[in-house]
Amino acid sequence: MRPPRFPISKEIAVILGALLLLLFASPVADWWSRGGLDWTTPYALWLLVILGAYFIHRRGDSDEP
């Protein structure tokens, strides 16, 4: 018998974490932090991260307490 898989919300959280690393700790950060973009760009990126985390948490799995 195979062990149970992680709930899908945990898989999405890992994907969100990888996306965070890509956006904030890679050469991609140099692209969006340069002067050509609006000053709200970092705030908009963090807002997307926060909304993603909110929707992952809100989704909730029925088998978790």
Image: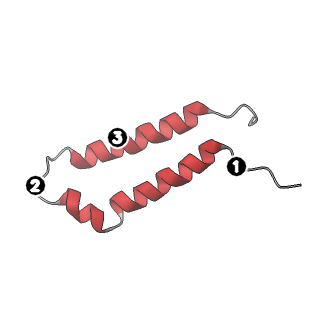
Q: Is residue 40 left or right of residue 2?
A: left
Q: Residue at x 50, y 34 (%)?
A: 55
Position in image of residue 29 (x %, y %): 27, 62
What SS does tag 3 mark? helix
Question: In what element is the residue under mark 2?
Answer: loop
Percent across and percent down for residue 35 are 10, 57
Task: Say whether residue 61 is left or right of residue 55.
Answer: right
Placement of the N terminus among the 4 image quadrants: bottom right
Binning the other alpha carbons within 10 Å of mark 3 as few (below 14), some (14 to 19) or many (20 upward) gives: few
Q: Residues within 10 Å of mark 2 (few under 14, many from 20)?
A: few
Q: Which mark is residue 47?
A: 3
Residue type, mark 3 in image: Leu
Q: Position of residue 17 (x, y in %)?
A: 48, 55
38 or 7: nearer the viewer: 7
**Number of residues whose C-alpha sits closer than 10 Å to that of mark 1, classed few (under 14), some (14–19) or many (20 or more):** few
Amino acid found under the numbered disc labelled 1 = Phe
Q: Earlier in the sequence, mark 2 or mark 1?
A: 1
Q: Which residue is mark 1?
A: 6
Q: Distance between the Cα atoms at labels 2 and 3?
A: 20 Å
Amino acid residing under circle 2: Gly
Mark 2 or 3: the one toward you: 2
Q: Residue at the far front: name it.
A: 1
Dot 3 or dot 1, earlier in sequence: 1
**At x 74% / y 50%, what residue is drawn?**
5
Q: Are marks 2 and 1 in contact (CB under 8 Å)?
A: no
Q: Residue at x 60, y 42 (%)?
A: 9
Sequence-first tag of 2 and 3: 2
**Contact between labelled residues 3 and 2, with CB atoms less than 8 Å apart:** no
